[in-house]
């Protein structure tokens, strides 16, 4: 009887540990953000999933990972980003492609989004894996509203799209160009995940 109780307690502890890991940290196998399979989106904008994670040895950094069906670095003005809120403040991190010849691939992160472009973004470390389609950003926490251990990142979403022309650089979307591209090619040059609502919250671990 005593052995049976001990075995039950061990099993409960094991299950609790697994659940705790899933609540606090995402992974490719258990991402905070997922997207439905879509055949009407260009592969380089077609989002599969996205997740957040941290490393105990690097408590001052937050990592984000965005997985696309394909990564194409030849197209200009691509935005491949993960978006969230921390204490009501808009934050994001991602890879921007084709805005500057000297920085064709620019990983950026920061906070702020709204009236008169009150945004605070800086270049960060990042990398992408062409084979897996995963874009990884290493973000200093002081660039994203300084979340502390136990803070919750809410309204998580992923966005992949292409801007066109000077108006696009100012932050406006030329919807009619996107519509025209879709009519001509049958494929959209933008994608959002999830399609409706938001992904799971993420709790800062360190």
Image (cartoon, rainbow, N blue to C red):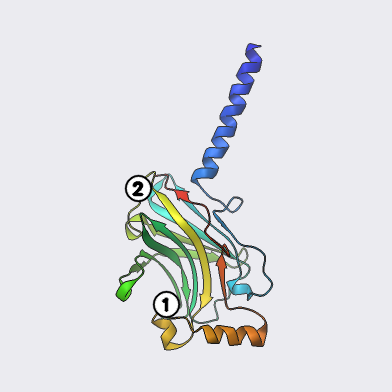
Which label was assigned to residue 148?
A: 2
Q: Is residue 142 above or below residue 23?
A: below
**Which residue occupies 49% across, 44% down?**
24
Q: In the rendered view of the protein, which quadrant contains the N terminus?
A: top right
Alpha carbon distance from label 2 to label 1 = 31 Å
Q: Residue furthest right?
A: 39
Looking at marks 2 and 1 on the same chain, the residue that comes earlier in the sequence is marked by: 1
Q: Nearer the viewer, mark 2 or mark 1?
A: 2
Q: Position of residue 53 (x, y in %)?
A: 48, 51
Task: Name the residue furthest front.
Answer: 197
The one nearer the camera, 165 or 54, is 165
- The residue shown at (35%, 47%) is 148
Q: Give the labeled residue for mark 1.
A: 103
The answer to whether 38 appears left or right of 148 in the picture is right
Residue at 36%, 57% (x, y): give it: 88
**Residues under numbered marks 2 and 1 in contact, where contact means CB atoms less than 8 Å apart:** no
- The mark found on residue 53 in the picture is none
**Height in image: 41 above or below 155?**
below
Q: Nearer the viewer, residue 154 or 161?
A: 154
Residue displayed at 66% across by 17% down: 4
In this view, the residue in front, 94 or 32, is 32
Q: Is residue 101 visible?
A: no
Query: Looking at the image, is 117 positioned above or below residue 59?
Result: below
SS class, disc 1: loop
Q: Quadrant of residue 134?
A: bottom right
- Residue 86 picture location, percent across and down: 38, 55
Left or right of 76 in this view: 4: right
């Amino acid at each position: 009887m005593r052995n049976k109780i001990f075995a039950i307690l061990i099993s409960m502890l094991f299950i609790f540990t697994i659940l705790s890991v899933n609540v606090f940290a995402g992974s490719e196998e258990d991402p905070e953000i997922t997207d439905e399979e879509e055949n009407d989106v260009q592969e380089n904008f077609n989002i599969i999933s996205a997740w957040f994670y941290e490393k105990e040895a690097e408590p001052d950094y937050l990592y984000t990972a965005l997985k696309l069906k394909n990564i194409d670095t030849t197209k200009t003005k691509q935005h491949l980003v993960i978006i969230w809120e921390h204490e009501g403040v808009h934050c994001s991190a991602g890879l921007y492609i084709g805005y500057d010849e000297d920085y064709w691939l620019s990983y950026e992160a920061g906070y702020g989004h709204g009236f008169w472009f009150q945004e605070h973004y800086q270049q960060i470390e990042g990398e992408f894996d062409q084979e897996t389609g995963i874009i990884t950003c290493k973000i200093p926490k002081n660039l994203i509203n300084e979340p502390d251990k136990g803070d919750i990142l809410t309204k998580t979403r992923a966005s992949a799209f292409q801007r066109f022309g000077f108006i696009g650089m100012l932050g406006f979307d030329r919807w009619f160009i996107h519509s025209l591209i879709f009519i001509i090619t049958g494929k959209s040059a933008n994608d959002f995940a999830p399609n409706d609502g938001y992904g799971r919250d993420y709790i800062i671990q360190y």
